[in-house]
Image (cartoon, rainbow, N blue to C red):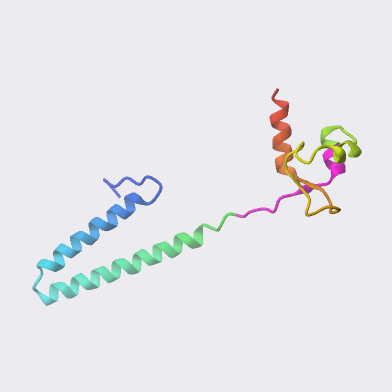
Amino acid sequence: MPGVEDDGNGRGSRLLGERMLARVARLVGHEDDPERLDRLTDATTQLLVRLNAQRKALRTVRPPPVVEPPEWLSAAEVATLLHRSESTIRHMAPDAIPGRRQQGKGFKVEWNKQVVLAWLAECSRW
């Protein structure tokens, strides 16, 4: 809308809505003709119907972002990435390689692939 800047948080459209409501309130407050009030009511209703239709159309056009579940690597796969033996990986401190998870003692140890690859990329910059 010309003259209304939106900062990305919806403040511009909220400001526009507040201005429109204030203008309608002024019109209604000074109006004493029932026919004009009926026309104003009809026009406002039509505007709200169009706004709701536009909002629904926008929501159906934009599907929600797909969040992929993380891919987990075994100790053998991490060892291959780091060019180390599986035994070396298993005997490292738990926080030596980021992205590690183990549900409890005796459970399988896995690493988040995305975190490990980001860590490798960071290490390789040196």
Look at 56% across and 57% down and name the residue there. 64
Q: Position of residue 27 (x, y in %)?
A: 14, 65
Look at 86% across and 53% down and name the residue there. 106
Would residue 70 be found to the left or right of residue 38 on screen?
right
Q: How many marks?
A: 0
Look at 69% across and 53% down and name the residue there. 69
Q: Position of residue 67 (x, y in %)?
A: 63, 54
**Quadrant housing residue 14:** bottom left
Answer whether residue 104 is magenta in the image.
no
**Quadrant housing residue 25:** bottom left
Give the farthest residue toward the front. 105
Would residue 29 be found to the left or right of residue 56 on screen?
left
Q: Nearer the viewer, residue 73 or 45?
A: 73
Answer whether residue 78 is magenta in the image.
yes
Q: Nearer the viewer, residue 60 or 69?
A: 69
User: What is the magenta range?
Assistant: 66-79
**Quadrant housing residue 34:** bottom left
Q: Is residue 81 above or below residue 56?
A: above
Would residue 14 be found to the left or right of residue 63 on screen?
left
Q: Nearer the viewer, residue 30 or 77?
A: 77
Would residue 12 be found to the left or right of residue 87 on screen?
left
Q: Nearer the viewer, residue 34 or 111?
A: 111
Q: Is residue 16 above or below residue 119?
A: below
Look at 82% across and 36% down and name the residue there. 81
Q: Position of residue 6 (x, y in %)?
A: 35, 47
Q: Quadrant of the C terminus?
A: top right
Give the farthest residue toward the top. 126
Q: Position of residue 96 (x, y in %)?
A: 77, 36
